[in-house]
Amino acid sequence: MREKKAKKIVFNSAEEMPLMIASVGSQTHNLTGAWRNIRPEIDRTKCLKCGICWKFCPEPSIDIVDEWPVVDYDYCKGCGICAEECPAKCIVMVEERK
Amino acid sequence: MKKVMMGNHALSYGAMLSRSQVIAAYPITPQTQVVELLSEMCADGTLDAKFIKVESEHSAMASCIGASVAGARAFTATSSQGLALMHEMLHWAAGGRHPIVMGNINRSMAPGWSIWADQNDSLSERDTGWMQYYCSSNQEVLDTVIQAFKVSEALMIPAMILLDAFALSHTYEVVDVPDQAEVDKYLPPFKPEIRLTPSDPRAFGGLTGSEHYFELRYKLQKDMEKAPALIEETGREFEKMFGRNLGLVDAYRCDDADFVFVTSGTAGFTARVAVDEFRKSGVKAGNLRIKVFRPFPFAKVREVLKKVKKAAVVDRNCSYGAHGIFYQEVKSALYGKAGMPPVFGYITGLGGRDITVDSFKEVAAHALAKDEADEEIVWIGVRK
């Protein structure tokens, strides 16, 4: 289960702060997929299971599950690189609707 | 062991002896032989490091940051436009407190295209939070790389080592290469408190609100303020082990001097020839070479200059619309303190024009003839 809210740490002085910002697990609750306005959809009837979409995804939000590429919509921002690179043209970018 | 080597290779040897673990570099001009030799060392096993060939200097610094976050000692080298392309990542390295050490060959910024010496490339990066060491011999270059890693890793602040193009970078000198075992005693492995590791995943450098950012930058400045003492302390320790002192400044015949040339980089050694000639003719001249520019050695500069009657700062750079950059810093070090000499400012040697003994004679002729330093910029060697 993912936590809904970040636990916010507030330091009261410079002395008690670390030198650098290093958050712990903030991405488990900060679901950046909400930024997306077009979503990739994979047509398994055409998919070659080549893994090129998995390799090119800059996030990386495509997992390989039982040999098939599966988009992780919690983090996919809809950039469309997977659709562009897919040699079988089996990935279509579909408009998100509320 | 003594070797004859160019300044670029002195940087390579310094990085090798420091046991750099990741070297990321873009190999095309304005890059120099620094990373060429390091790539050979990585290929033949002399250096146990990962060499990452990247597609730009921006990526070179980004790779070094990634390596440093993961706890590796990272090194790179660049020059002029390459350093400018790194600009965003320089802020990231300093703000994220990643103690990367980089060699930068001081080359003039284009246009017009130039591969020749001046300092505007690195001085344009003075406010990024990097330490800057301006070297004047190949021996000093090699030694300073090792010292810089020690200081940087203690304070978690990155550092750049600066070499004048050609005058140092491609000039061959005899360099005493220290034994690896001795360097290992001086510079222990890099062990950061927090690092990126799959067993303890973290996100570095994330969104920082106004309730924390200010304090982080305060800490960077406070740690930067610790650097002068640490540079002197590690310099003395270096001297004890290797016989060569590495300080903040290098004062030559300044103790009884009436008139001092303030220089940086290779111009200092030329200034010394001029100083010796002036001494023979009865003028008590001296040379203060400022080696460390960030953090600026305010106290050290005051200590040397308070005893002299006139100081002439010779800049191989220009802050357009203001003045020579070292000139401004020296003035700010002395301003408001009692008993300080007038400071004259000179700009020379831009775009690799030679700075010769005659250049210093011209500087002296101007400064010695005047009682007060006004704000005019005096250009030496320009064809008006």
Image: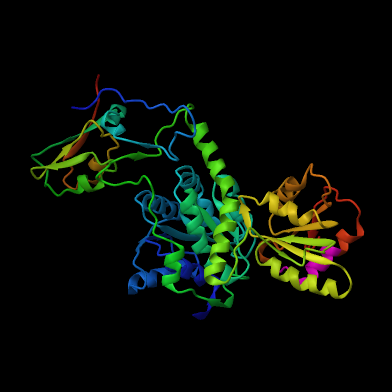
Q: Is residue B125 left or right of residue B38?
A: right
Q: Reply above or below: B67 against B13.
A: above
Q: Is residue A16 magenta?
A: no
Q: What color scheme is it?
A: rainbow
Q: In which quadrant of the rendered view does residue B117 lie?
A: bottom right
Q: Reply above or below: B50 against B58.
A: below
Report the front residue among A81 and B57: B57
Q: Main secondary structure of the magenta part?
A: helix
Residue name at image x 30 percent, y 30 percent: A32
Q: Reply above or below: B199 against B60.
A: above
Report the front residue among B313 and A14: A14
Q: Is residue A64 left or right of residue B303?
A: left
Residue name at image x 41 percent, y 71 percent: B181
Q: Position of residue A75 (x, y in %)?
A: 26, 33
Residue name at image x 45 percent, y 28 percent: B209
Q: Is residue A22 left or right of residue B120?
A: left
Among all residues in the image, which is located at the extreme top? A98
Report the front residue among B232 and B37: B232
Q: Is residue B200 visible?
A: yes
Instruction: Please provide the residue range marked out in magenta.
Output: B353-364
Q: Is residue B141 visible?
A: no
Q: Is residue B363 magenta?
A: yes
Q: Position of residue B123 (x, y in %)?
A: 62, 52
Q: Position of residue A79 (x, y in %)?
A: 30, 37
Among all residues in the image, which is located at the extreme front? B240
